[in-house]
Image (cartoon, grey):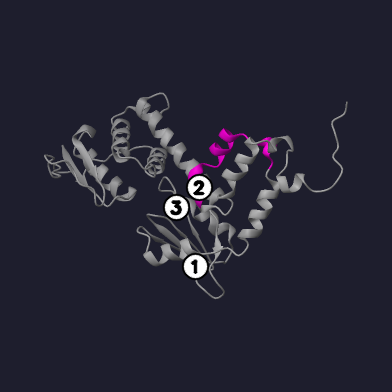
Amino acid sequence: MMQVRFDGSFDDWRDRARELLQSGVAPHQVEWLGKGELGGLFDEPETTGPVDAGSSVRVPRQLIDELESAARFRTADRWSLLYRVLWRVAKGDQTARLVGDIDGTELHARIKGVRREAHHMHAFLRFSPVGCGELPNYAAWFEPAHDVLVSAAPHFAERMGLNSWLIATPIDAVLWDGMVMHYADRCPPAWRRLAQNAQDPGAELWKTYYESTFNPARLNRNVMQSNLPVRFWKNLPEGALIPQLMSQARAGAQRDGQAERVANQPGKRIGRPG
């Protein structure tokens, strides 16, 4: 099997994939190795044949967009699937990109997973102020399951105005200086520390509000964990409260339909009509 090394980016993968297509290298002959990845012990180094400068590979622009989106899905065979779909479409098999085909179904499942993770970032990321006169003005730490930072970050630039902000993840980071987006494919340690240590002075007030408005009577554990996955709780101010509130609901708080501190306030309780 041929080892094809690239820098781990979609752009570099696309260039290498084009060369392989023009050289007639089939998907089963290729092992894709991104930055820092090791191949098998008996695999052969990359040796593509001469590329015909006059030949060209034409595929729909929409397919390239789909492949780029699916490339953000973190899984061991992400580049292999992309090349297999690209190879089949380039050879005239358009079903490779359709739901119902084994490769097309997996392709669109990954695209859906990436879109959902971008939605999670938009919904569950929390900025904290860094300090007066500091750059950036706000910082946030987020742990996405897929490589969605670059595609999801412009959402915050549109909503934060001229404020500068930093989003750091375990892998990469992005800094918006109020005018320009700066991307680091390896999160600098200083950025990581800044994002993880930023404290929101309004966090306690927010937790009090969240606890007082929590409605045990409407709690559906499965629905809640589907819309707010457990893996995000540790980085949310209210995350530490959720298990306690859920426990109280199971213990009988659902009868009141309100958090305990609200249900115990003095006032007239209106019963149901007879």
Residues rendered magenta in the picture:
215-234
Residue 177, which numbered label?
A: 1
Element type where label 3 sits in the image: helix
Q: Where on the picture, by quarter, is residue 27? A: top left
Could you tell which of marks 2 and 3 lies nearer the N-terminus? Answer: 3
Residue 172 drawn at (x, y percent): 39, 56
Classify 79 as above or below 124: above
- The one of 246 and 57 positioned closer to us in this rendering: 246
Is 203 in the magenta? no
Which residue is denoted by mark 2 in the rendering?
232
Amino acid beneath label 3: Leu
Question: At 41% from the left edge and 45% from the top edge, which residue is drawn?
Answer: 146
Alpha carbon separation for disc pair 2 and 1 = 26 Å
Amino acid type for the residue under numbered disc 2: Phe
Q: Is residue 118 visible?
A: yes
* Residue marked by disc 3: 149
Q: Secondary structure at mark 1?
A: loop
**Which numbered mark, 2 or 1, is in the foreground of this view?**
2
Number of numbered discs on residues:
3
Choose between 230 and 191: the one closer to the eye: 230
Residue sitting at x 28%, y 39% = 57
Left or right, 31 with reference to 223: left
Relative image position of residue 128 (x, y in whole percent): 55, 62
> Could you tell which of marks 2 and 1 lies nearer the N-terminus?
1
* Residue at x 36% of width, y 26% of height: 102
Question: Rounded to the nearest whole Å, what is the CA distance between mark 3 and mark 1?
Answer: 16 Å
User: Is residue 236 shown left or right of residue 212?
Assistant: left
Which residue: 77% across, 46% down?
264
Going by the image, does 210 lie left or right of 114? Answer: right
Marks 2 & 1, CB-CB < 8 Å contact: no
